[in-house]
Amino acid sequence: MAVAKKIRVGIFFGGASREREISFAGGRTVYDNLSKDLFEPVPFFVDSAGNFCLIQWQYIYKGTIRDFYPNPEEIEQSKFDFQIYAESIKSKSQQAKYTRQLGKLIKADELDKYIDFAFLCLHGSDGEDGRLQGLFEYHRIPYSGSGILSSAIGMNKAVQKKLMHHAGFNVPAYYLIPRSEWQRTDTKTAFLKNAITTCSLPIVVKAANQGSSIGISVCESEDAQKFTDAVEKAFFIRTIEATVWQDLDHNARITYVRLLADIRDGIGMPIRCGKKVIYHPDELFDFIEHSLQSKQRIQLEALNFESDVIIESFIKGKEFSCIVIEDENAKSVALPPTEIRKGKEVFDYRSKYLPGLSRKITPIELPLEQIERISAECERLFTELHFSVYARIDGFITDSGEIFLNDPNTTSGMLPSSFFFHQASEIGLTPSQFITYIIATSLSSRYGDIKDGDTSLQLHKQLMDAIVAGKSKSENKLRVAVMLGGYSSERHISVESGRNIFEKLASSTKYLPFPVFVSGNRQKHHLHIIPINVMLKDNADDILEKVNNYIHHPVIDNTIIRLQNITQTFSSNENLTAPYEISYADLKNKADAVFIALHGRPGEDGQVQAELNKINLPYNGSDVHSSQTTINKFETNEILLHAGLHAAKHKMFYKRTMLKML
């Protein structure tokens, strides 16, 4: 019997926008989680000039784009050890040379020879603003997410607010500052007065066409300088005073320029000052040094500038984010909204993407009636803005119960910890299964958008047939228990590692993983099989709390019922089973092998290995003896020294001895 051809999914990531690193990380997540039973992943890196590169797979696992593009081994070394973006390479042919080193450059009209479907992980301009969507429609290639019009609306915050106000949504008071007006007006106090008159203090200042909370500030007082700094931050303009620069020592000046040249924290390169364009951070450092010797101040602005800045009223209340998807009848359905608890006032770029700076509480802690109103408003906005397939809608609910929806996005961040996967897990979908659903829904949506004959429908039918056939094949896969958590100080890192392993195995053709959370102490290990939504909680302590106090929330239960046709097709019942404890003997009956993703104790000290040896269950990594040895750094060094190998000189100090000395 002939093997059905897999759908070739082009995963597009990178791009020219300030969010390219988030796009890169999201593309890697999709690449890892794309079901290898159903799809053939085809990774496309989009460089800073918009070229499509069929990238070699090893580059996908670099830390950041700048680790491989431009090639750090070939570009001239920065005298200040700055990492270099491609925009700092003046020659377009040289930029293209560095791109060609990563793989094969593919022209837009050749893409259909390599892919059947485009999964878009690009953010910002040329990614989620409708331009790329238009290119794929022109070439009759179905793609993920919303279409051209809704993508353009989703990118422009000023247009969004007008449409939302017209449709009867609560919209905070706002004031728009065009860049041209700001630049030609010497005195900025009029803008501040207009902003306060329109919006009242405190006010939020943000770029009109940026995502990931790039360029956002809060002004709490009528301080003209702070307001000017906030607006110029959003326009990607920076004024440097000579007195400020001179107060910095040499290392502080290097750090200043490093942050200034960074697309996430600063204004990015290239930079213009008057008629001069500066491409390289080294050149920028020298220019600032020289210019401020004779001038009181200089003004720098990014060539990749923002056209409009929005000032809006600060909304005080609980902040939330909600993923809305289309069901099988193209009707919008909100997934359980997540409360964002952040460590600072603004949920900025770093709060969104760096672990530990914010927490996700799903569903948001509110009375049931208020959660349902949030969901209903998000669904209504999804429909009003003509979104399709999925969207992420952020907002606030005030103490008085008013709901303000804010900055709807047609493309969500797709990092492993993103709202996109976090909320899908609440209805029992693993990241791999949710991506499959997004592709299936996108194929249905594109049939009406791009008029490609029956191509999209044929691909949809092929996919659905393969999903049905694949459910029987899963019985022949190797069952792998992924052990994560533990009780050491490294338990949170273990959770990250375990999730990573689970997701890679879940998308494979050979393995059927299930998560096993480990807690307890040296005397007693507690093993719990946990559902997907618990596995994707923020950290090990949150998981343990859910293990001990698992509650069926009515919002989640109602959403599962509404989407039961989807979960029955794309998921499995085990994904929604409440946590339950098992013994090591029970584990023997449920798993064919164990992947130990535990850090510290237990897991690296031989304890778990010893228990698995008793039941003759194979596992990854070292055996009991070597694990017991290497967990002890003193004993490890002693062995190395006695073997004639180089090791640091060392001495053992015991806690009881140190306490006696106090």
Image (spheres, rainbow, N blue to C red):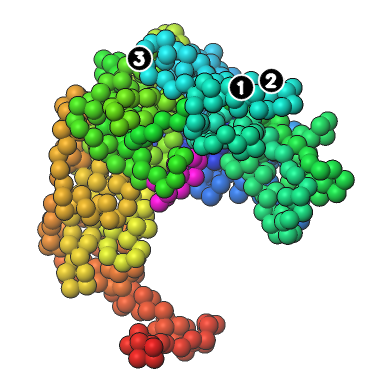
**What x and y, as percent, mark residue 161?**
47, 18
Crowd tier of the residue under label 1, counting other residues whose Cα lies within 10 Å: few below 14, some 14–19, many 20 or above: some
Please give the name of the residue rendered at 37% of the width and 55% of the height, measured from the top-left corner: 497
Q: Which mark is residue 177?
A: 1
**What x and y, as percent, mark residue 92?**
75, 33
Question: What residue is pinned by disc 2?
Answer: 181
Which picture quadrant has residue 221?
A: top right
Question: Who comes first in sequence, dot 3 or dot 2?
Answer: 2
- Distance of mark 2 from mark 1, alpha carbons? 7 Å
Crowd tier of the residue under label 3, counting other residues whose Cα lies within 10 Å: few below 14, some 14–19, many 20 or above: some
- Distance of mark 3 from mark 1, alpha carbons? 29 Å
Part of the protein shown in magenta: 348-358
Of the pair 437 and 3, the residue shown nearer to us:
437
Crowd tier of the residue under label 2, counting other residues whose Cα lies within 10 Å: few below 14, some 14–19, many 20 or above: few
Is residue 500 depicted above or below 364 in this figure? below
**What x and y, as percent, mark residue 660?**
35, 91
Q: Amino acid at mark 2?
A: Glu
Secondary structure of the residue carrying numbered label 2? helix
Which picture quadrant has residue 36?
A: top left
Question: What residue is pinned by disc 3?
Answer: 383
Q: Amino acid at mark 1?
A: Ile
Please give the name of the residue rendered at 36% of the width and 43% of the height, measured from the top-left corner: 341
| CB atoms of marks 2 and 1 within 8 Å | yes
Of the pair 402 and 611, the residue shown nearer to us:
402
Secondary structure of the residue carrying numbered label 1? strand
Q: Amino acid at mark 3?
A: Thr
Q: Quadrant of the C terminus?
A: bottom left
